[in-house]
Amino acid sequence: MSEEKFPVEISPVYEGERIRKEDMFVELGGPNVQYKWELVQAKPMDEVEDGKVSIIGPDLNQLEEGKYYPYGVLVEVAGAQVEKDLESVIERRIHDFSNYVEGYMHLNQRYDIWCRVSKKAYRKGLNSFKWIGKALIRLFKAELPFIEKMQVTFYTDPEKVKELYEFALKVYEARDARTRGIRDEDVDTFYSCVLCQSFAPQHVCIITPNRVSLCGAINWFDARAAARVDPKGPVIPVPKGECIDPIRGEYTGANECVEKRSLGANKRFWLYSAFGYPHTSCGCFETIAFYIPEVDGFGCVDRGFKGPTVNGLPFSTMATQVGGGIQSEGFLGLGVEYYRSPKFFQADGGWGRIAWIASTLKERIKDAIPPELVDKIPTEKEVSSIEELKKFLVEKGHPLAEVIKAKEAEEAKVAEAVAAEAAPPTVTPTVPMEGVVAAPSVGGIRISFSGAKIKVGKLVIVK
């Protein structure tokens, strides 16, 4: 590699740097473009040119300031110890090392990457993707010495980004499918990742065979490989310890790890529940599950969904409530693969508790939804409000229908009782009052008495 002087600083101090819209030169990927991805591929030694950085499409200095662009990052690695199992492990570290580059913000992973280059960094000379590529190669080879050769290709040509996007999706799916044949009960070790603590200091991710990382990029096999080749890295093994609660998914080993790695901020995790002691969330989660008290069920939305959810809030608003590494009952960040887990919301009713799903997410996980519920769980195309949701679930015979009807009946009783208490009292005596001359009406109010004995010292009626 050339020893050219970098135009910006490369240091862990820039982890967590946020580049606001008004400060950005360009945005790469992110919510405003459809196609974006990053992918690592293990290659034979003779297929990788060490230190090579290629750009397919316009370079940074050819992009228009303030605009959004499709974006793809392909990292190819080789080495005697490099194997296919390590691809996703290396891939997830792109997030880590990209954020070492001053003025280059990297969020999320896989098909959700969201990057920005700041105006300040661009003016300092970060005007070509070659600098980002050289920084990544230098950092990866320094931190992960099993990588002997590495080359990076950046894609900004829209057609090429789209073409390789389809290929990347197939690679991701093949990786995810590997863990579907094993259960948490089949292993004695879970794994923990704290890669996102630069953005969420209290967050600790617990990865099990039946619970993929929130970002969706690291499954149990990936974590095992990461811990083996980089024992001092962000992913470490976690002995399960004693199973305290098999339904909620609480383990002594996981609790000890959570308390230690969150520096005491969190002490317990229920891995299969959104209540009590829910798993914390970072900011890179693929989807959000949120509680809807009006139907006693959950809604689910993915990062790619643009509009408001059934509770009126968009993904971006709820993300601020979910993230940050705090335990928020009723809100969870989830990886897409978790929807296919046999322990999906196990303690909270499983799929029978899901009341609404964004259409973009439903299409991706349709194979995971029990066939008898597919048409009973609406999207924004069928309902747009809580009232419409209630009606839909009852009409379709969703498992939550009886709960909804019971709640509505109880609400009606309460409303009736409140109305009765608020009604003005009616006085209807018919026995004439001694010493008082009865009038047919007083100020438009007619008074009659029936079956009553009333003694009144003074009666004043004022209109």
Image: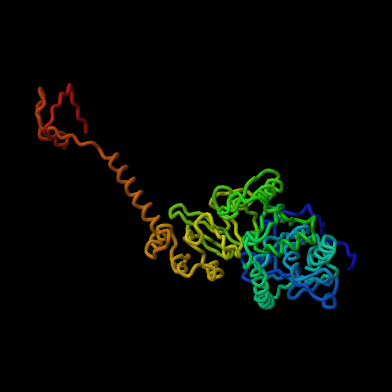
How was the colour assigned to the protein in this rendering? rainbow
- Residue 28 location (% of width, % of height): 69, 66
Instruction: Name the residue located 55 percent from the left edge and 66 percent from the top edge.
Output: 361
- Residue 341 location (% of width, % of height): 58, 63
Q: Is residue 103 above or below residue 71?
A: above
- Residue 38 location (% of width, % of height): 71, 69
Q: In this view, does 384 lie to the left or right of 113?
A: left
| Image-quadrant location for residue 447 | top left
Of residues 258 and 136, the one drawn nearer to the viewer in this rendering: 258
Q: In this view, does 128 lie to the left or right of 384?
A: right
| Image-quadrant location for residue 441 | top left
Q: Is residue 277 above or below residue 6?
A: above
Hey, which residue is sitting farthest right in the picture?
Answer: 3
Q: Is residue 58 left or right of residue 111?
A: right
Q: Is residue 389 above or below residue 77?
A: above
Of residues 248 and 154, the one drawn nearer to the viewer in this rendering: 248
Labels in figure, total = 0
Of residues 264 and 183, the one drawn nearer to the viewer in this rendering: 183
Q: Quadrant of the C terminus?
A: top left
Instruction: Name the residue located 67 percent from the left edge and 55 percent from the top edge.
Output: 205
| Image-quadrant location for residue 29 | bottom right
- Residue 75 location (% of width, % of height): 77, 70
Q: Quadrant of the N terminus?
A: bottom right
Of residues 262 and 74, the one drawn nearer to the viewer in this rendering: 262
Instruction: Name the residue located 30 percent from the left edge and 43 percent from the top edge.
Output: 417
